[in-house]
Image (tube, helix red, strand yellow):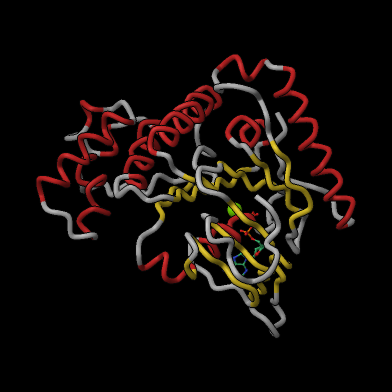
Amino acid sequence: MTAAADSAPAPSAAVSVGRASMVFNAGRVNEVAALTDIELDIQPRDFVSLIGPSGCGKSTLLRLIANLLTPTSGEVFVNGKPAAQARLDQDYGMAFQQSGLFEWRSVRKNIELPLELKGWAKQRRADRANEMLELVQLPEFGDHRPWELSGGMQQRIAIARALAAHPPLLLMDEPFGALDEMTREHMQAELLRICAAAETTVVFVTHSIPEAVYLSNRVVVMSPRPGRITDVIDVDLGGERDEDTREDDAFYATITQVREALRGAEHDSGQPVRGVDDR
Ligand SMILES: Nc1ncnc2c1ncn2[C@@H]1O[C@H](COP(=O)(O)OP(=O)(O)O)[C@@H](O)[C@H]1O
Ligand SMILES: [Mg+2]
């Protein structure tokens, strides 16, 4: 990932954000400058976390990439296309803090939903749902209803649904925020395994420093509002990540590096950093 040189996307970039700014309610008393001059290139198979204090614009940036919002100025490309086209082409899956599963549909029917929207035939949908249930290691739960599953299991199903149609890009906004610490660490390991198997590029919003470091090959540090990117930290933990990674010196050293970058970002903006969880 490098800063975009100009407004044209790098041909190989999974995501390219060029000088994007976002102002909500422009010209009104409740005007909010949420993001300023965001430049970000994300390469295929990158796992990039966006970290910063509450209100710094992490979700807004993710929503710009998802084309759920249009930037006030600047450009967003996904897979070399304008984000609006990528959305039409269903180039990405999304998962949020709440699993967003439909309670009246079985687990299997939830996973099949994006495939129905794409017009996949019945048998192909069923086969893919089975594959995804295997991938998230819940093959026996296809006919259950979401409310019969634990929070962690529901999140795994939400990830299965987000990845069912083979989207090259997965966008996640604090997907593990509602889980207890043990389940959360387990889900982080699962997510790495699933995304490696599916060869997916991930943009992941979190306010947990250890979570960002454990998951990512790059951590994008944002300043308090109006959000800017103040640092991009490469994470090199050597080899495969597993439970031992959490005890590594390199893991702690990178956590310290991110924490100091967040303090620097706070200093730049003159505002205290709140809502960053560095446990
Ligand atoms: N739809 C919206 N309308 C007005 N203001 C918004 C909207 N969405 C977000 N904001 C404001 O933009 C800023 C950034 O919000 P957000 O991206 O949700 O931050 P984060 O995800 O980092 O906590 C906040 O001040 C928030 O109040
Ligand atoms: Mg948010």
| Residue 110 picture location, percent across and down | 25, 46
Indicate left or right for 88 with 51 as reference.
left
Quadrant for the C terminus, please. Answer: top right
| Residue 19 picture location, percent across and down | 69, 69
- At 73% across and 60% down in the image, what residue appears? 227
- At 81% across and 42% down in the image, what residue appears? 261
| Residue 92 picture location, percent across and down | 41, 55
Indicate left or right for 191 with 268 as reference.
left
- The quadrant in which residue 251 appears is top right
- Pick the residue in front: 51 or 273: 51
Q: Answer above or below: position of 22 versus 102.
A: below
Residue furthest to the bottom in view is 27
Indicate left or right for 153 with 230 as reference.
left
Residue furthest to the front in view is 11
- At 71% across and 44% down in the image, what residue appears? 275
- Pick the residue in front: 77 or 160: 77
Q: Answer above or below: position of 56 versus 162.
A: below
- At 84% across and 50% down in the image, what residue appears? 266
| Residue 204 picture location, percent across and down | 55, 45
- Pick the residue in front: 176 or 6: 6
